[in-house]
Image: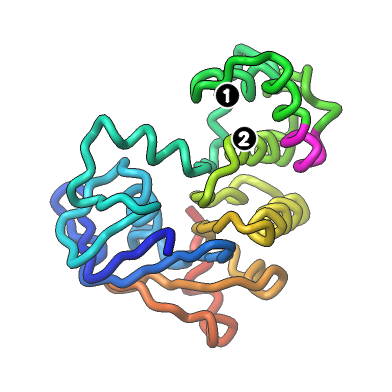
Amino acid sequence: MLIDYKKVKICQEDLCVLDGIDFHVDEGEFIYIIGKVGSGKSSLLKTLYCELDIEEAEEATALGRDLMTIRRKDIPALRREMGIIFQDFQLLHDRTVYKNLEFVLKATGWKKKDEIKERIDEVLEAVEMSEKCDKMPHELSGGEQQRIAIARAILNSPRIIIADEPTGNLDPETASLIVNLLKNISMSGTAVVMTTHNIPMLDQVPGIVYRCKDGNITDVTADYNKMDLTEDAESV
């Protein structure tokens, strides 16, 4: 079990957004988290990589670490086993695609130039962006920048990818390509957990579906396509 949450309470400032929740992630699972704005989706993701503290829990573990007792100095090691993808890409705009990826590898302990180049070539090929390695981020479309963000996320062969609205700023066709890319990554054994308002995507690229509502989170995989789509498709 990569993520094991039992009776977890999550607060944002003074507001309790999720309480008594159970949430689990295993290897190779492809998981959507849906729900209205403010329902706790992003807060849940932030607790996974310790950007937000958990208020209370019967159990809260991520990649073998107890999130209730983890020390601040141990959080970077936890995050190195994760790939985190943001809606706004968060690429470094003062350097090329290659240099963006090289920066991450060097920051995580890679030293040999030939090994760094080989790994960058591998991930760029995986996201079909090999020809863009010398481009600056501003020279790329939104979809291309998100592909590079995914390449960055998989550089260190993470056990889990956490993606907060990775298609929120993309057109439907590009969004479909990005979600299919993430689905393919999950099929290699890396779990993927992503929040989304793109409800039609759940039919196009099936996965496990959790819904945040009224302070709780529920597995609605069996009946998500029966929900009122307008309720959860409220835009950011």
Q: Residue at x 67, y 54 (%)?
A: 185
- Name the kind of residue labelled 2 in the image: Leu
Position in image of residue 12 (x %, y %): 22, 50
- Is the residue under label 1 in contact with that under label 2 (CB below 8 Å)? yes
- The mark tally for this picture is 2
Q: Secondary structure at mark 1?
A: helix
Is residue 189 located in the magenta-colored stretch of the structure?
A: no
Describe the colour scheme in one phrase: rainbow
Is residue 128 located in the magenta-colored stretch of the structure?
A: yes
Report whether 65 appears left or right of 55. Answer: right
Q: Residue at x 58, y 36 (%)?
A: 156
Mark closer to the chain start, 2 or 1: 1
Mark 2: few/some/many CA within 10 Å (<14, 14-19, 20+) = many
Label 2, on which residue?
155
Q: Residue at x 31, y 50 (%)?
A: 65
- Name the kind of residue labelled 1 in the image: Leu
Position in image of residue 91 (x %, y %): 58, 26
Which sits in the foreground, 125 or 157? Answer: 157
Q: Secondary structure at mark 2?
A: loop
| Span colored in magenta | 122-129
Residues at marks 2 and 1, CA–CA distance in whole angstroms = 7 Å
Label 1, on which residue?
105
